Amino acid sequence: MSKHTSGPWRADYRGESGFNGEHEWWITLEDDDCHSVAVVRHGADDPEYGGHPVLKANAHLVAAAPEMFEALLSARSLLSAIAETFPNSEHVRMTREQIKAAIEKAASG
């Protein structure tokens, strides 16, 4: 379904990149820190983006993406079964729509 690099991934702080003093977090395969899957980079002290704590949180969120994608696939299956029992549940319908949209966004690459 999706063409992304299989996980698990991890976030590794690599320090300043030398490019405008930006700080970098590399998203790498858990067992291969030589090849990055993605890089999260921004000036660590830029208040517009929350500085280094937000950069770190963003990097860890990206690193969790493969596991979250798999969890969404499982949740979609579970909610399909629940929807059969509660076909008129607005909450189930809305949650299924959110999950469907997130899966489609992740798989569209």
Image: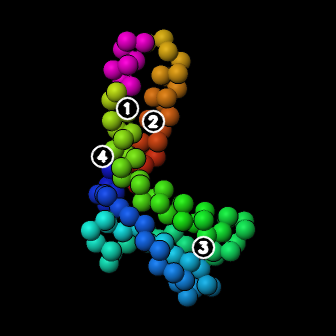
Q: Which dot, 3 or 2, sits closer to the camera?
A: 3
Task: Give the x, y percent position of residue 56.
Answer: 54, 65
The residue tagged 2 is 99
Judging depth in this view, the residue of 105 and 27 nearest the camera is 27
Work out how far the residue at label 2 is from the one at label 1, CA to CA, in angstroms. 7 Å
Say few, some or many: other residues with alpha carbon within 10 Å of mark 3 (under 14 / 14 to 19 / 20 or more).
many
What's the mark number on residue 1?
A: 4
Separation of residues labelled 4 and 1 (CA atoms): 14 Å
Residue type pointed to by label 1:
Arg
Question: Picture coordinates of residue 103 (x, y %)?
Answer: 41, 42
The image quadrant that residue 3 belongs to is bottom left
**Disc 3 versus disc 4: distance between alpha carbons?**
31 Å
- Residues 61 and 88: in front is 61
C-alpha distance separating marks 3 and 2:
30 Å
CB atoms at circles 3 and 4 under 8 Å apart? Answer: no
Pick whichever of labels 2 and 1 is earlier in the sequence.
Answer: 1
Residue occupied by mark 3: 42
**Residue 81 screen position, x and y as percent:** 33, 20
The residue type indicated by label 3 comes to: His
Please give the residue where the numbered disc 1 appears in the rendered image: 76
Query: Magenta part mainly helix, strand or loop?
Result: helix
**Which mark is first along the chain, 1 or 4?**
4
Whichever of callouts 3 and 2 sits on the residue coming sooner in the sequence is 3
Residue at the (48%, 38%) spot, across then down: 101
At label 4, counting other C-alpha atoms closer than 10 Å, the crowd grade (few under 14, some 14-19, many 20 or more) is few
Q: Residue at x 45, y 28 (%)?
A: 96
Residue reaching furthest to the left: 31
Q: Is residue 15 left or right of residue 109?
A: right
Q: Which residues are magenta?
A: 79-86
- Select label 3 or label 4 by which is in front: 3
